[in-house]
Amino acid sequence: LTLAALPRLESDTYNKELWEQVANYRICPFQRCDFIEMHNNVAGGSCHFGFFTQDDPAGHCASSAASSFSGNVAHSSRTGLVVMEASDCIGINNFQVYKTVEVGILVERP
């Protein structure tokens, strides 16, 4: 079990430190990744996302290569889980989301 709850320095704007947690877990935020596994983690207290990732929409659907999210908990954030460019065979199960402002789970398709 992994817990991510503390903010970190994201940017320095006008010589002022901005302590804002974009996401507790940012997995492959700037490139597409195939075969992402996130199991049994807790993300809490983010200003934006508990979990954020970019999947590979051309990813392989073999059970050994599909991205998988299970047993995770996201709370006290704007959105629990965001998966950008999700493939046809991403697996999301036993994912708990509570105390979110906007969306629990958002899966964006290309």
Image (cartoon, rainbow, N blue to C red):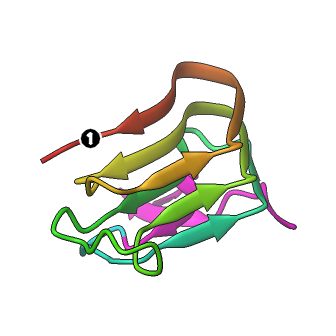
Question: Is residue 20 shown in magenta?
Answer: yes
Q: Quadrant of the N terminus?
A: bottom right
Q: Residue 104: image x %, image y %?
A: 55, 27
Q: Residues within 10 Å of mark 1 (few under 14, many from 20)?
A: few
Please say whether residue 20 is visible from this viewpoint. Answer: no
Q: Which picture quadrant has residue 39?
A: bottom right
Residue drawn at 72 percent across, 51 percent down: 72
* Callout 1: SS: loop
* Frontmost residue, 61 versus 80: 61
Q: Which residue is mark 1?
A: 108
Q: Name the residue at the right extreme.
A: 1
Horizontal side of 16 relative to 54 (left or right) equals right
| Main secondary structure type of the part rendered in magenta | strand
Point 47% across, 70% down: residue: 27
> Mark 1 is on which residue type?
Glu
Residue 79, how many percent across, how many down? 52, 33
Q: Residue at x 43, y 63 (%)?
A: 11
Answer with left or right where residue 39 lies relative to residue 21: right
Residue nearest the observer in this picture, 97 or 4 = 97
In this view of the protein, which residue sits in the foreground, 96 or 8?
A: 96
**Residue 76 falls within the magenta-colored stretch:** no
Residue stretch in magenta? 1-28
Residue 94 x %, y %: 71, 43
Residue 35 in which image quadrant = bottom left
